[in-house]
Amino acid sequence: MKLLVSPKNIDEADASVRGGADIVDVKNPKEGSLGANFPWVIKSIREMVPEDIPVSAAIGDFNFKPGTASLAALGAAVSGADYIKTGLYGVKTEEEAKEMVSKISESIKGYDPNKKVVIAGYSDCHRINSVSPLMLPDICKDYDVDVVMVDTGVKDGRSTLEFLSEEEIKGFIDSAHKIGLDVALAGSLNIDDIKKIIPLNADIIGVRGVVCGGDRSSSIREELVKEIKELVTV
């Protein structure tokens, strides 16, 4: 299982690398769960992070705006991100979701087919009136997507495991793997949550709050990244 750590600036990115992160995921917590950072921040972090460590970038929690999302996705790719993550935050129907996924993947892969397309849904979808993350394998199966992800949309300390059972998560992972998609799990996960998730065979686990000492608005600490890295290295 790979550890994805989400820094907001170059100092946090450095702490993430020193702590052993497998993927450095640039985001801006002030703008939401998958808040987008600035192109120059993505670029500076990509230049600082060793070449063998992929850099990911979140581009936002999107409602149904496929054009805006496609342009943002291309901007993250041009800025140096290897993985580009889009959240279907205000996307309410399967049809809307498929159009978003289609246009975003076309935008990214048309620029560089080696870039990874990550589509995220939210475990607390009922709180934000968006499509269920459990639908993502079916939504993404006909498009050029690499990773499906589950996060939480409302950052109030409640974790993904409060909204989805371990059985539901395992079913989601298995469905995605059957069609060749990798799976990333995130969403205010604490150490106990991570211990429960490890046996479910996800490919990536994403963290921020737990490596900031429990407060995602604080700063990433190298020693906490190391602790989680040791936990997921099995």
Image: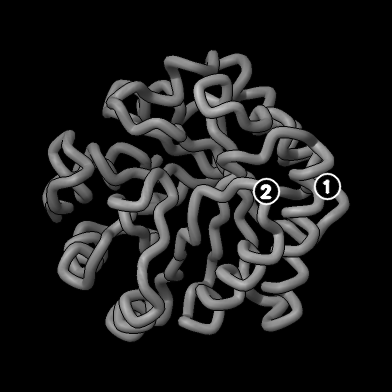
Q: Which sits in the foreground, 191 or 112?
A: 112
Q: Position of residue 76 (x, y in %)?
A: 51, 73
Pair 1/2: label in front: 2
Image quarter of residue 157? top left
Question: What residue did someone put label 2 on?
Answer: 64
Q: Give the mark, 1 or 2, whose residue is nearer the N terminus.
A: 2
Q: Position of residue 207 (x, y in %)?
A: 34, 44
Question: What residue did someone put label 1 on?
Answer: 141
Q: Is residue 44 left or right of residue 110?
A: left
The residue drawn where x is 49% and y is 26% is 199
Q: Position of residue 189 (x, y in %)?
A: 34, 31
Q: Dot 1 lies on which element?
A: loop
Residue 174 seen: yes
Which amino acid is tagged 1? Lys
The vertical placement of 17 against 180, above or below, is below
The residue drawn where x is 80% and y is 59% is 102
Distance (Cα) linking label 1 and label 2: 19 Å
Q: Which sits in the foreground, 19 or 107?
A: 107
Image quarter of residue 8? bottom left
Q: Position of residue 174 (x, y in %)?
A: 71, 31
Q: Which sits in the foreground, 150 or 178?
A: 150
The vertical placement of 35 against 160, above or below, is below
The residue drawn where x is 38% and y is 24% is 159
Q: Which sits in the foreground, 20 or 113?
A: 113
Which amino acid is tagged 2? Phe
